[in-house]
Image (spheres, helix red, strand yellow):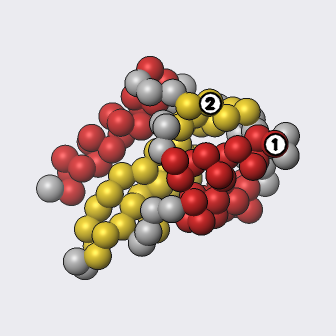
Amino acid sequence: MVVVDETWVRVKGKDAWIHVALDPRTLRIIYLEPFFRRDEYTTDLFPEHPVEEYGEWPREVITDGGSWYRAAFSFWQIEGRISWKVVRGGGRSVNEGFFGEFLKKRA
C-alpha cells in the first residue's frame, strides 16, 4: 500500500508541486517527483515513473479527493493494476505529517 499526495512549493519564483508516494507502515518514500504544474496529465505521469524504476506499482493506492487523481488512478484501476481509495484523514495523515516536516525544514 502507498499513500500519494502533493504539496505546493515555490522554485525560483515559479509554482511547483512535489508529488510523493509513501509506505504508511514503514514511512519509506517510495517515490518523489516535482512538477511545475498540477493537473491530470502530470498526475498521470507520476504513477508511471515508479513503475519504470521499481518494476511494479503497489497494489493499493490511497489519495485525497483531488480531482487530478481521478483520471490517472481510475484508469490504472480499470486496467486492474491497482486498487485505488480516496481517504480524507486516517491513512493519509502520514503524508500530511511528511509534508508538515518538509515544509518546516525548508522555511
Task: Depth check: give the residue in front, 1 or 7.
Answer: 7
Task: Give the distance between the C-alpha atoms of the residues marked 2 and 1, in whole angstroms.
Answer: 13 Å
Rendered-image quadrant of the N terminus: top right
Is 62 in front, or is 102?
Answer: 62
With respect to residue 66, does 35 lie above or below? Answer: below
Q: Are marks 2 and 1 in contact (CB under 8 Å)?
A: no
Q: Position of residue 82 (x, y in %)?
A: 75, 39
Looking at the image, is 72 positioned above or below residue 63?
A: below
Residue 85: image tag: 2
Query: What residue appears at the point 44 percent right and 20 percent down from the top-left corner?
Result: 90
- Residue located at (51% from left, 27% from top): 87
- Residue 63 position (above or below residue 91): below
Which residue corresponds to mark 1?
A: 78
Q: What residue type is labelled 2?
A: Lys
Residue 59: x and y in percent read: 74, 35
Residue 86, picture quadrant:
top right
Q: Residue 97 is drawn in which quadrant?
A: top left
| Mark 1: secondary structure | helix
Note whether 41 is above or below 62 in the view shown: below
- Kindly give the residue lying farthest to the bottom in the view shown: 12
